[in-house]
Amino acid sequence: MTAPVADQTASPSAVPSEFETLAKKVDDALAAVRALDPAARGTAMSLKDSIEAFHKLALTTMVKRLKDDEHGRGLLFSMVDAPEIYAMLALHGIVRADLRTRVSRVIDMVRPYMESHGGDVELVDVQGDRAIVRLHGSCNGCSMSAVTLRNSVEEALKEHVPEISGVDVAPNEPTPALVTLESRTAKSKEGWIAGPNVMDIATDRPYRLDDNGVSAILTRRDNVVQAFRNVCAHQGLPLDSATIDPEDGTLTCPWHGFRFDCISGECFTSPKAMLEPLPLRVENGVVWVRLA
Ligand code: FES
């Protein structure tokens, strides 16, 4: 009963106490069997496996017949809502929760680890074989933490949800409107650092700007400049050696080739992943960026 009981922890309030009691009895009995001497344990486990195989055969036949019948399908769906029926069918691999629910459960599973590192993770979406997450706390803004924690989420997802091939990190702030050279006026320099002159930013590669351990890239297309955190939305790796196509403004990450709009930060490879923009203004031809 171990696997289904674990599944049920995602919504503990839906689990009837009788179900929990029975499941615990099974788990306790199993633990006792595992403590037996090898010969007795082998016999007991063989009995358990035979009974489970028998149950699985019967349940599979029952579910198949229900699925084949128009009214049976409705009945089956309503029965699966009962935790004990769902647990039994899940135990035998006859039903599975939908992909997003399963991804969400794994995210809940890794959350304590993220929290122990001062971070958190939120599931934004599941698109095809990729999970889109947003990182919070210490993982937001520190590229090393972000990479480490993101990789932990990805490993857990790949292990428990084989349909997921990878994780993309969505930015924490919405992308602002395009920033034109004329659109910003200096008011305060607090928290801002001065960058290059606008015309010193090449149009075919990003300009890297670092301060106090925080790294940004500046991009330019014609008369528009933008600043992003120097972190690719794919695997959190640095973007400062990316290339930019001056014709269409596409920035290509050097690591795995994800493509982004160099001004809006929109990702063409995985549409909900975006680069994280940073506040930027231009004063007397000089770019100022707030990295903090
Ligand atoms: S880190 Fe993989 S495409 Fe950028």
Image (tube, rainbow, N blue to C red):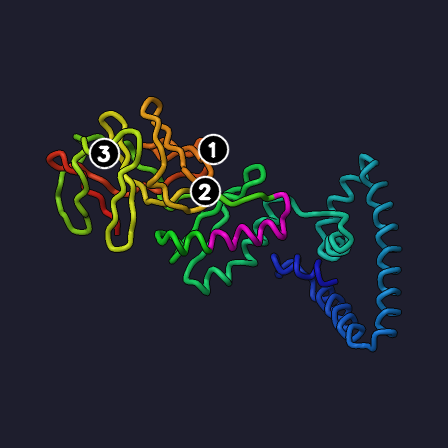
Q: Which of these two is toward me, 104 or 194?
A: 194
* Residue kind at label 1, given as amino acid type: Thr
* Residue kind at label 2, given as amino acid type: His
Q: Which span is picked out in magenta?
A: 149-163
Q: CA distance from mark 1 to mark 2?
A: 9 Å
Q: Which of these two is toward me, 204 or 259?
A: 204
User: Measured from the top left, where is residue 258 in percent x and y?
Assistant: 45, 35
Q: Is mark 2 within 8 Å of ligand 1?
A: yes
Disc number lying in front (2 or 3): 3
Q: Quadrant of the N terminus?
A: bottom right
User: Measured from the top left, where is residue 228 in percent x and y?
Assistant: 31, 41
Q: Going from the N terminus, do you reach mark 1 or mark 2 first?
A: 2
User: Measured from the top left, where is residue 158 in percent x and y?
Assistant: 60, 49
Q: Going from the N terminus, do you reach mark 3 or mark 1 first?
A: 3
Q: Are marks 1 and 2 in contact (CB under 8 Å)?
A: yes
User: Measured from the top left, where is residue 90 in percent x and y?
Assistant: 74, 52
Q: CA distance from mark 3 to mark 1?
A: 25 Å
**Residue 39 colored magenta?**
no
Q: Which of these two is toward me, 159 or 31?
A: 159
- Name the residue that disc number 3 marks: 201
Q: Going from the N terminus, do you reach mark 2 or mark 3 first?
A: 3
Residue at horizontal 78 percent and vertical 39 percent from the top: 73
Q: Is mark 1 within 8 Å of ligand 1?
A: yes
- Name the residue that disc number 1 marks: 269
Disc number lying in front (3 or 1): 3
- Residue extending furthest left? 284
Query: Does 135 appear above or below 274?
Result: below
Q: Are marks 2 and 3 in contact (CB under 8 Å)?
A: no
Secondary structure type for disc 3: loop
- Please tell me how crowded label 1 is: few (under 14), some (14-19), or many (20+) other residues with Cα within 10 Å: some
- Name the residue that disc number 2 marks: 234
Residue at horizontal 45 percent and vertical 55 percent from the top: 148
